Image (cartoon, rainbow, N blue to C red):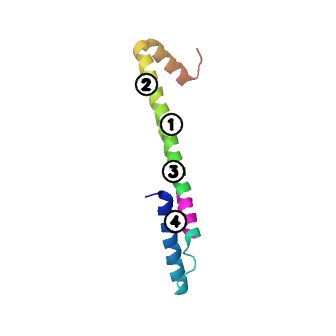
Amino acid sequence: MNTQIMMDKALSGLDLIGGRLEKLGITDDFNRHTVLAYVLAEQKHLEGELDSLRARLDQKKVSVQRARNFVSQAARHPFKTTSDTVRNFLGRKG
């Protein structure tokens, strides 16, 4: 079934339920506009959460890559790596 047809049927059903509730005097806030606003707000919230997760994942990737580079350099040049680490710790250059 076409997604547009499904969407139209769902919105029509939503309008019908909202209309019946309004006739019963229960609420007039249940309509397609409030539901769509809620859905869109939740979609934006989810997108923000996913962006946050991506940023944290990228930070972890950078940390792992730095550690990998450090270990690789230390394995190739153990004395230079150790002396560079001590110099950095003491705040001296070169």
Q: Nearer the viewer, mark 3 or mark 2?
A: 3
Whole-angstrom CA distance, mark 2 to mark 4, is 54 Å
Report the amino acid beneath label 4. Answer: Asp
Front residue of 2 and 24:
2
In the picture, the disc for residue 8 is 4
Q: Callout 2, which amino acid?
A: Arg
* N-terminal label among 4 and 1: 4
Residue at image mark 3 = 49
Cβ–Cβ under 8 Å for marks 3 and 2: no
Residue at x-position 53% and y-position 51%: 47
Tag in front: 2 or 4: 4
Distance, label 3 to label 2, CA atoms, is 29 Å
Label 4 packing within 10 angstroms: few (<14), some (14-19), many (20+): few
Q: Secondary structure at mark 4?
A: helix
Q: Which residue is mark 2?
A: 68
Asked if residue 76 lies left or right of residue 48, the reply is: left
Of badges 4 and 3, the one in the foreground is 4
State which mark lies toward you, 1 or 3: 3
Q: Counting residues from the N terminus, which is met first, the one under dot 2 or under dot 4?
A: 4
Picture residue at 46% right of the left edge, 27% below the top: 65
Q: Earlier in the sequence, mark 1 or mark 3?
A: 3
Going from N to C along the chain, the mark reached first, 4 or 3, is 4
Q: Where are the magenta residues, as a range? A: 34-42
Residue that mark 1 sits on:
59
Q: Is residue 39 magenta?
A: yes
Q: Identify residue type, mark 3.
A: Glu
The image quadrant of residue 88 is top right
| Disc 2 from disc 1: Cα separation | 14 Å
C-alpha gap between disc 4 and disc 1: 43 Å
Q: Are marks 2 and 1 in contact (CB under 8 Å)?
A: no
Mark with earlier residue (2, 1): 1
- Quarter of the image for the N terminus: give it: bottom left
